[in-house]
Image (cartoon, helix red, strand yellow):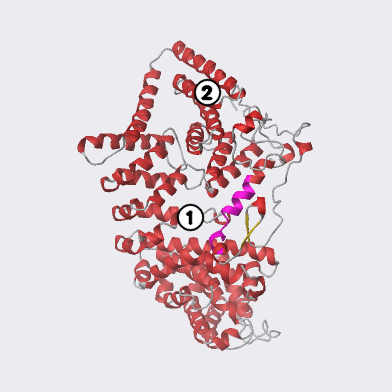
Amino acid sequence: MDKVSSDCPYPGCFFCVMKEGNPSKRRASVLKFFRELPCQDDDGQVLPISGLWNTAMAHPNDPEFIELGIFECMSALIWKGLKNRRWLSHDQNIYIPYYAAHIIGSYTMNMEEFAENAVHAGVIPPLVELLRGRLTWVEQRVAVRALGHLATYASTFPAIASHGEILELSIQLAMSSLEIVYSHFYQYVDRRLSYHCDLLTRGMGGVEMESRKAEEWASQLQCWSLQLINCFAFKQEFLPTICKPEFLTKLPGMWGGLVNENSPAGIGLLRTICHQKLGRGPVASCPGIIDALCNIAQSSDDWQYMAIDCLLWLLQDPNTCHKVIDKVVPALVDLAEITTLGDHKKLGDSIVNVLQECIQSQGSGRSSTSSRTKEQIEDILNSKQRLKWEKSMPKEDLHIKQAAALVVKLEGNSLFSSGNISGAASKYSEALALCPMRSRKERVVLYSNRAQCYLLLQQPLAAISDATRALCLHKPVNRHAKSLWRRAQAYDMLGLAKESLLDAILFINECSQSNDPDLSLRQNKVPDYAERLVKKQMRAAWLFREAAIKHGGVHSQGDGGDMYGPETDDSEWETASESDIGNDGRDDMGDDDDGDWNNDDERKDYDKPSMKDIKHGYNVQLAEEEP
């Protein structure tokens, strides 16, 4: 070993220790290194800790360092950083508490045995100190991550729960994390701590990269806080602490953003809460939450099914059904023909069964429902009965019904072309009544066409309803491009930026993959109208939006709306020029128009279509056949 480390300036260097060829000697040296490191004040300590951090991320299930005392060492180093500010500010020691907490989190994320070892090693108290914010938000991020992993296991959760303040701290952090990162890092470039910048970008990025990473880390800080709270939410005794209105009402907005799309975030926690009887009452008492759940259930959010689960559980509970039924039923009725959604099989049948139970409960006096809600449920039950009847009908009769529906649809198209939008919508309704239930493709077209009518009639709720029905009927679910675009516009009218953004992005993806020449993107360019809507909604749904408003980081951009943070080149999507979209400057997306107008100089307010567009001859014609 002496021969290996003869050129090393640091006695007992960790990297030299790891080069030892004799396994027993190496283990003994590593054991000694872990025991002695917290007591040393030599320079260069951050290098081995950084090396251990890389090892923990690459091999989190390797037990060698666990057995040799790495948790005790990391715990002691965090305490040292908290208690000895002189040492913390010396050399590069400021990085060590962050790396130490990250190492603990990495080694405990997969193995319950390792988590038990970590608890016995005393890692929880120093992690709680970091969670309190004794250092900075960067250390809070890795502390809440590590505590979240420890709370995941049945054997170690009691140790987390015994620290009563962990839940309260996590709730406060979930609510304030975005503001903390914005005000302590993002807002003032010249005040950024250098070691924060280095940790965020590994020294490879400039101001713009640091800002982007800050958004990602802020999202993680919030989502990991929610994950930790979620562990508590499975235990009924903690629900009163969690289910406070000021926290619950914020949960639907904690969506993680596009930078953290894999986290179930706030909707995941709401699902855990709604799964329990004690949690459903507080949720049902917050109308804003119910509205948000309905919006998520009718969106293309990856966690759409979680919102649907919440709504179904609230309806099935006699103590909450009467509070939510009039708001929930319209959303679920639109989803009643959905088939498979993720791992949920025959989801539409489950929805119909729950709605049927709601109707049956009226006789027992368990709930009170408006006449409109009863009619909606009866309509969907009649549709299911109609489908059964059609199975026994002769094929000739079904063909006659389908032909009759086609004739009426063509009449609707003609009325639409002449500018009679209300008349066209009525014809599409008549065609839907005639069209066989099993003719799913034809019904997709009819619902989507009627959604376009409702857009032009300034009825966004009706447009969302029809577009959602079309998307549920389509195979695969939520992949009918033109219905996505129409719903994106309708959500925009209502100011629902996140839902509009997700639909618009999915619309762009569908266009890029479509074999339909009317939908495929020319030269892989994003349609100008879709680009503009995405940019608008990304500004409106910006992760730091509320924090920026609170701290004065918002400034007006005239017709461009609000911009948050520093002005940047927002042309991440390549814009199609007029020469790319046709000789006459018209965007030829196909006959079944998606509300995409030409002549941008005359059409500034593109997200609010009206009869003026018809009179001016904009390209808003519907297809005579399937879009």
Disc 2 target residue: 423
- SS type, badge 2: helix
Residues 36 and 354: in front is 354
As measured in the structure, the alpha-carbon distance from the residue carrying label 2 to the one carrying label 1 is: 39 Å
Q: How many marks do you count on the picture?
A: 2
Q: Residues within 10 Å of mark 2 (few under 14, many from 20)?
A: some
The percent position of residue 196, horizontal first and vertical second, equals 61, 72
- SS type, badge 1: helix
Quadrant containing the N terminus is bottom right
Q: Residues within 10 Å of mark 1 (few under 14, many from 20)?
A: some
Q: Name the residue type under label 2.
A: Gly
Q: Residue at x 64, y 37 (%)?
A: 511
Residues rendered magenta in the picture = 533-547
Q: Earlier in the sequence, mark 2 or mark 1?
A: 1
Vertically, is 293 above or below 486? Answer: below
Residues 394 and 617: in front is 617
The percent position of residue 609, horizontal first and vertical second, equals 60, 36
Q: Provide the major secondary structure of the magenta segment.
A: helix
Q: Which circle, 2 or 1, is nearer the viewer?
A: 2
Q: Is residue 136 left or right of residue 333?
A: right
Vertically, is 29 above or below 538? Answer: below
Q: Residue at x 51, y 14 (%)?
A: 403
Q: Residue at x 45, y 56 (%)?
A: 266
Disc 1 target residue: 253
Q: Is residue 60 left or right of residue 320?
A: right
Is 59 magenta? The answer is no
Q: Name the residue type under label 1.
A: Gly
The percent position of residue 590, horizontal first and vertical second, equals 66, 29
Q: Which mark is residue 66?
A: none
User: In the picture, residue 325 is in which quadrant?
Assistant: top left
Q: Is residue 230 visible?
A: no
